Amino acid sequence: MTNDPGMLKRLKHDLITACVIGTVIAVSIASAAIVLGHVGDTEARRLLEAIIPTSRLFCSSILTVSATILALMLTMIGLGNNADRNLADAHYHRIIKIALYDAILFSSAAIMFVLHCVPVYESDSLPGWWYPTIYYGVLIASSLLAGGSVAIVSLLYLAVKDVVQIVALGQTDHRYAASQADEDDASSTTDHA
């Protein structure tokens, strides 16, 4: 069942693993901005003009990746349903969590993508200190999106690995494999319907 402490521990372990991987990626990318050092108002405006098209393309790529991940998760659900071996409820709860995190990533990328449509660097009425702030904000937001996408792909990898171990390799003692009692409950429910 989903309240099994072993399964909850495994879900928590997978989430922590993915968060650590995503954080390492985000910090690594953000540290590139720190290595560049402080940029002045004029330089930040010039750099902002240079990175906005690339950052816009990056946001578009994150939108594509997150939508593709949702489609892949539907495929994984179909594989689990069509398999001879049943998967435990905890597996499907994990898929729901991954879908939630993916939807958050999609929303964040969409917001950042729309913000890129504002031609900030073409305005002459903004104070000079805005340009370094926006420049560093774009760099940090891009690094967070990259870290988030790597974390979600890590979660998806762990889920796919478990499905392969249960469905293709036939591990019946796997944490996400439904026990015989769960299968009997499922078949008795369908018999009564």
Image (cartoon, rainbow, N blue to C red):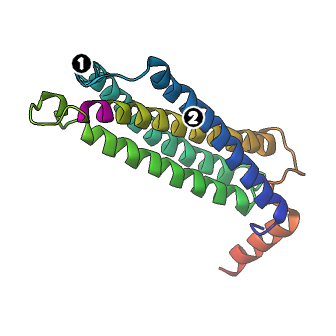
Name the residue: 49% across, 33% down: 146
Q: Residue at x 37, y 32 (%)?
A: 136
Q: Quadrant of the N terminus?
A: bottom right
Q: Residue most toward the bottom? A: 192
Query: Three-letter amino acid code at disc 1?
Result: Arg
- On-image quarter of the C terminus: bottom right
According to the image, label 1 marks what residue? 46
Query: Which range is magenta?
Result: 130-134
The residue labelled by disc 2 is 150
**Quarter of the view holding residue 48:** top left
Residue in view at x 27 percent, y 23 percent: 53
Helix, strand or loop status at disc 1: helix
Q: Residue 67, position in %: x, y?
A: 43, 42
Q: From what the image shows, is residue 58 above or below residue 16?
A: above
- How many neighbours does mark 1 have within 10 angstroms: few (below 14), some (14-19), or many (20 or more)? some
Sequence-first tag of 2 and 1: 1
- Please tell me whether mark 2 or mark 1 is closer to you in this view: 1
Q: Are marks 2 and 1 in contact (CB under 8 Å)?
A: no
Q: Is residue 148 above or below residue 7?
A: above
Q: Is residue 138 left or right of residue 69?
A: left
Residue 131 inside the magenta-drawn segment: yes
Seen at 65% across and 55% down, the residue is 94
